[in-house]
Image (spheres, rainbow, N blue to C red):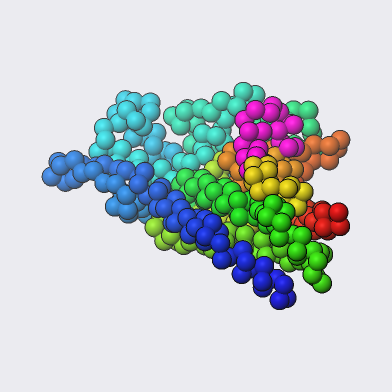
Amino acid sequence: MKILQMELRRMLKTRLTWGLLALALLLSALLAYLPVTYCYSSYTDEEGNEIHLSGLKSIAHEKERQANASGIVTPERVREAVETYQACLAAYGVTESYDLPEDVYEREILPIVPLLHGVKEAFADPDTGMAPALMEIDPERIDDYDSVCEARISALMALEQPDHPAAQRKAAEMYRQVERPFKVYPGMSSVIMDYQNIMGFLVLLFCVVIAAPVFSADYQSGADDILRCTRHGRRRLGVAKVLAALLVSGVSFVLCAAVYILIADSLFGWECLRTSVQMMYSIVTLADLDVGGLQFLFTAAGLLSVLASVSFTLFLSAGCKSTVASLSSALVFGILPVVVSMAVPGALSTWLCCVLPASGTSIQASILYAITDFQFLNLGGLAVWTPYAMIGTCVVEIPLFSFLAVRSYCGHAGK
């Protein structure tokens, strides 16, 4: 315990560590606020004046206008919303809502927009995946909305993974377990989760930078020659170094995630957390979660990804003789999932992103996008949903790379 306390003090007393942790907290707060700056709305008041709103005022205005749409999304409410939409557009002789006069859209369409989410996708052509216009949908068919959505996930998986019937069956089974009817509480968009993902990616890189010199710095300075001569200068010291790096990284990520969630949810409204993820992403999203559950799951999975990445960084550090080598190699592996997701085609990209420890919070390849996607790892007749694979891989990698880091350090000390 004393060795661990000494390693914690040693790690926390450096300016680099405190500077990166302070920057991480500052960026978490900034990223939580940034989505507010993108909110914009305009309307014409009773006196004919055009009013433009931005930021928190825009959020409050739209939430007020869409208050009646809040609650359980029953087929009856969806059908009424579609009928209102079709009647409004027919009255003005247009086929798309953006052709309506601005005041008409504000008065008639904006209040029902949350209930229209996913309707076109649910009635997409099963062979081509092309979604129809809302004006082309028969409102009477919405009475059987749940069955339509279940048919849509089957058709989508047949298009996405035609050669893997196990994945198709697994997806249909998962969707049947999703709680319905869905719920919607307007005010929050998927941008909030995107920025939380960016926050996680930046914190991961900062933690990698902090962990990279843990072993290699002592090799480079020659301090390791002295430390290894002490009574506990090998295995116990190696374990203490690993635990200290994991503890600092884990606490840092949790604090940054807490700052982000508290600020973002306070700005957009805590009631929005009860919205089903299907009403924010695809209507046939497989996860049985609301937005609050998605935030918690992504935070937990992001924490595992950070700890797995730090463990791998420590393994690299224990095998490198200089901080430059350990830091550069760790950063390469931290950014590698981004490159893989963009450059490597097909199933190979999916497999690699599930294995690489930094994938959990990576840009474009994170567990957030895996949860809202329909990718499976297929091995014979076995189909595993990629979020499960990513979480399971991190759970295995944390003790594995930690053990290898200590073993590598002890082997270096024995030379």
- Return the residue nearer the eye: 25 or 271: 25
Q: Is residue 236 left or right of residue 285?
A: right
Residue in the image at 43% along x and 60% along y: 263
Q: Which residues are magenta?
A: 331-352
Q: Position of residue 227 (x, y in %)?
A: 75, 65
Image quadrant where one finds the C terminus: bottom right
**Residue visible at 44% across and 56% down?**
26
The chief SS type of the magenta part is: helix
Residue 123: image x %, image y %?
56, 33
- As drawn, 59 above or below 12: above
Determine the residue located farthest toward the top in the rendered image: 128
Q: Is residue 255 above or below residue 338?
A: below
Question: Magenta segment: does it hold 332?
Answer: yes
Q: Residue furthest left?
A: 47
Q: Tell me the quadrant of the picture where the N terminus can be found.
A: bottom right
Does residue 339 appear anywhere in the picture? yes
Q: Is residue 77 left or right of residue 161?
A: left
Between 103 and 31, the one nearer to me in the picture: 31
Numbered-mark total:
0
Q: Is residue 384 left or right of residue 207?
A: right
Q: Is residue 395 visible?
A: no
| Residue 231 within the segment the image draws in magenta | no
* Rendered residue at 44%/38% (across/down): 82
| Residue lying at the far bottom of the rendered structure | 2
Using the image as rendered, state which of residue 62 and residue 311 is in the foreground. Answer: 311
Residue 304's x, y, as percent?
A: 68, 55
The one nearer the camera, 377 or 316, is 316
- Residue at 83% from the left image edge and 40% from the top image edge: 382
Residue 173 x/y as whole percent = 73, 45
